[in-house]
Image (cartoon, rainbow, N blue to C red):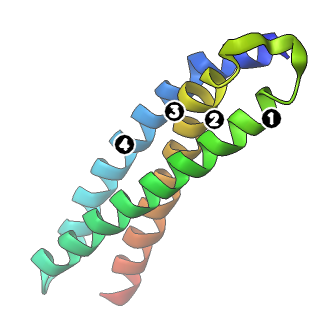
Amino acid sequence: MADVLNLLIKIGPMVLLLGLIASIVLAVFGLARREDDKARWLVRYVLGSVVIGIVALFAGTALGIAVFCSSEKMGNLCGLGGVFGSGPLLAGISLAIHAYRRVRGASNAS
């Protein structure tokens, strides 16, 4: 379980960074495809991304803490797997999915 914890702590922040980069790139593509009401679409996109990112971060953190702290072998640093591992991992994945769905919806609406 400790190997999974270490791997998750290393991968989680990278996935969050990649999710943020993907959502910014997809926002540029989505904004370019919109002909009308670009400002309103961008505000909705950013607010939706922030809400989804925060909810996914807290849910992933809580889930990671619950999983890693359930084992007595993990010690007193078991919460780090949730805070730096599964929380950012879930937030990055959800940001990328949300961005893809919003941009795909923007291209279908045009």
**Label 4 near label 3: C-beta < 8 Å?**
no
Which residue position holds label 1?
A: 67
Which residue position holds label 3?
A: 15
Relative image position of residue 97 (x, y in whole percent): 52, 58
User: Given the image, on which type of amino acid does mark 3 rest?
Assistant: Val
Q: Residues within 10 Å of mark 2 (few under 14, many from 20)?
A: many
Quick one: SS at disc 2?
A: helix
Residue 48, image quadrant: bottom left
Nearer the observer, disc 3 or disc 1?
A: 1
Mark sitting earlier along the chain (1/2): 1
Nearer the observer, disc 2 or disc 3?
A: 2
Relative image position of residue 17 (x, y in whole percent): 40, 32
Which residue position holds label 2?
A: 86
**Label 2 near label 1: C-beta < 8 Å?**
yes
Instruction: Please give the count of numbered marks on the rendered protein.
Output: 4
Nearer the observer, disc 4 or disc 1?
A: 1
**Label 1 near label 4: C-beta < 8 Å?**
no
User: Given the image, on which type of amino acid does mark 2 rest?
Assistant: Ser
Residue 40, image quadrant: bottom left
Residue 108, image quadrant: bottom left
Q: Residue at x 37, y 69 (%)?
A: 103
Which residue position holds label 4?
A: 20
From the viewer's perspective, tell me whether residue 103 is left or right of residue 8: left
**Vertical comparison of 36 with 94: above or below:** below
- Cα separation, mark 4 vs mark 1, equals 26 Å
Depth check: 59 or 16 in front?
59
User: Given the image, on which type of amino acid does mark 4 rest?
Assistant: Leu
- Cα separation, mark 2 vs mark 3, equals 10 Å
